[in-house]
Image (tube, rainbow, N blue to C red):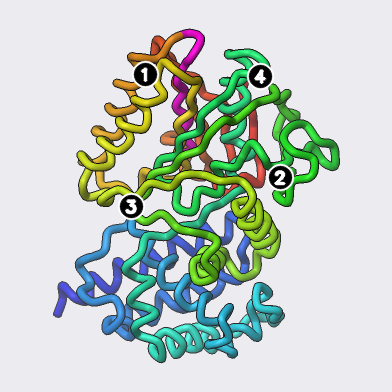
Amino acid sequence: MAEVTQLRSTLGDWFDSQALSCAGLGSPLYAALLPAVAERVREGRLDHLLAPLDRWRFGDAMPLRLMGASHALALSGRAPDLAGVYPSCGGTVPEPIDTASLAESVLESLGAHPDHTADFLHRAVQTNETGRASALVLGLSALAASVGDGAPISLVEVGTSAGLNLRMDRFAYLDGESLIGGDANSPVRLSPEWVGGAPGLHPWLVADRVGVDPHPADSSDPAVALRLRSYLWPDQTERRSRLDGAIALAGEVPAELVQTDGPMNPNDTAATLAGLLGDRAGSVPTMVFQSIMWQYVPTAARWPITRAIEEAGERATETEPLVRVTFEPDEFRRDRVAVQLRRWPGGSGTLLAHADYHGRWVQPLP
């Protein structure tokens, strides 16, 4: 019994930790609600949904899976009590928030739809946060500048989900209301706070786009689009607007999404990536990138993926270089992201920027 109590406590702590992240990332609704859900986790009231309790690791982002399940029910009209207070469903957040009542509504909705909840708990979180492209595009700009105007570039994303950021070249990048890069007519308009000043973005030309993922998502499927929206936080309507624009753009701009056997099979993921990069290395300038992906990949699976990229880099040339751009937590300050670039030939590394996890602010570095 003591072991079960400890497991419940640990899982509850993860909800509290996620609440702090939500507070820092602009979701006061989830910041208030998640601690109330955490209390009920510690009481064992979600054991029937989360069992076995020892299957979870922190990197699974289980709180986001569970809250995504309840948000999907609200978005689809199956949780009217939640929809009434979720702005994403046309509701209004009350002041003050009755977190106890709202948490009970979350539990009731999940309990009433156990198969739906189990499906969400089985799936990795797929946020498809297009705001991160404001930082990722710095790598695309750097590659375009190094190969010259008009040179076609190939984009390869690891952990692509629905591949929405594979269309980053077709987003509009703004400094306030002024376009600084991308497509002026894009339905995805990114205007982060540019800390230290907006960057100069070099024009680019993207020739093809391919993403790999154990669970690639077809955003043209209404059920998939609902799931993507459910992972957004209900009081963040700007993120919803960006996502809807990106889904619309994905319907116009094709990208190839390749399924792997999953992160637990590092050799398959690495082999798939090696094949894709092998077709490109030394023949077309290529940018391979990832954003908040490592936490979902077991440590043993990371090195084969990295090695596949490095081996492709060894075949790159000065006229057809390979760059790897990563958007991952800063190891020195976990409240921000470090955007790093490695370039082959040579494999030299550069810190391009620091950024907010959702791209609300970006600090380009010289």
Mark carried by residue 214: 3
Disc 1: which residue: 313
Label 1 to label 2, Cα distance in Å?
Answer: 31 Å
Label 4 to label 2, Cα distance in Å?
Answer: 24 Å
In the figure, residue 243 lies in which quadrant? bottom right
The answer to whether residue 66 is left or right of residue 11 is right
In the figure, residue 282 lies in which quadrant? top left
Crowding around mark 2 (Cα neighbors within 10 Å: few <14, some 14 to 19, many 20+) is many
Disc 2: which residue: 190
Crowding around mark 3 (Cα neighbors within 10 Å: few <14, some 14 to 19, many 20+) is many
- Tag 3 and tag 1, C-beta contact below 8 Å: no
Closer to viewer: mark 1 or mark 2: 1
Mark 3 and mark 1 lie on one chain; the one further toward the N terminus is 3
Quarter the C terminus occupies: top right
Q: Which stretch is magenta?
A: 318-329
Task: Tell me: residue 32, above or below residue 357.
Answer: below
Q: Amino acid under label 1?
A: Gly
